[in-house]
Image (cartoon, helix red, strand yellow):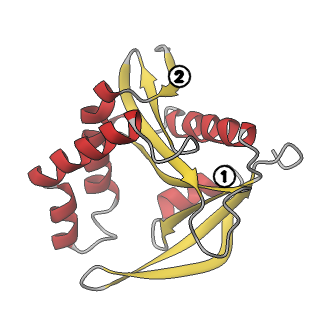
Amino acid sequence: MADVGVRPARRADAAAVAEIQVRAWRHGYRELLPAGVLDQVTGGAAVEQWREKWAEAATAPPSPRHRLLVAVASDLVVGFAAHGPAEDADLDPAGTAEVITLLVDPLHTRAGHGSRLLAATADLLREDGCATLVTWVFEDDEVTRTFLGSAGWAPDGTARTLDMGEPVRQIRLHTDISDTGA
């Protein structure tokens, strides 16, 4: 088995993270998002913007609780997760954090990288005093919902509709990461 793990992202990882994001979105969201929107957020100009965004997330996060982690296999970045304090008005950001994104390169799925990223995220946030994690997923994204469900995540009853030229519905999932819930 290859040498695998999770570590904090570095500026040098930004290009790999952006490329993984684009490949994962093109692969996983092609049935979930309007084609024009997907083309816009995964096109050449967008890739450069994502690189800049991820370089900033790695080197100058907005708070100490915002982190970007990467999954590596034999020194190759194969996935990433970003998290920060929960921003939804109905949540307490002191005890609740949000997984903003968690993506694994489609060429490296089903190898445990997503699970390692989730575990590392939960460990860091538990150390920060968080007891609950939330994330938003597309309602029709059965792959992500099944993956997170197998890790103990469930819908919390909150939903939102994004205007992407046509309505795209998301649901919020949550899980308990407290010492008693872990």
Nearer the observer: mark 1 or 2; the answer is 2
Quadrant for residue 76, please give it. Answer: top left
Give me the residue at 71% from left, 65% from top.
Answer: 92
Q: Tell me the amino acid under the disc marked 1.
A: Ser
Q: What number is the disc on residue 150?
A: 1
Q: Please name whichever residue, 54 or 122, is drawn nearer the observer in this view of the structure.
A: 54
Q: Is residue 41 left or right of residue 138?
A: left
Q: Tell which circle, 1 or 2, labels the residue nearer the N-terminal end.
A: 2
Q: Please name whichever residue, 51 or 34, is drawn nearer the observer in this view of the structure.
A: 51
Give me the residue at 55% from left, 74% from top.
Answer: 171
Q: Which residue is mark 2?
A: 5
Q: Tell me the amino acid under the disc marked 2.
A: Gly
Quarter of the image containing the C terminus?
A: top right
* Percent x, y of residue 145: 55, 61
* Percent x, y of residue 97: 63, 54
* Percent x, y of residue 63: 52, 46
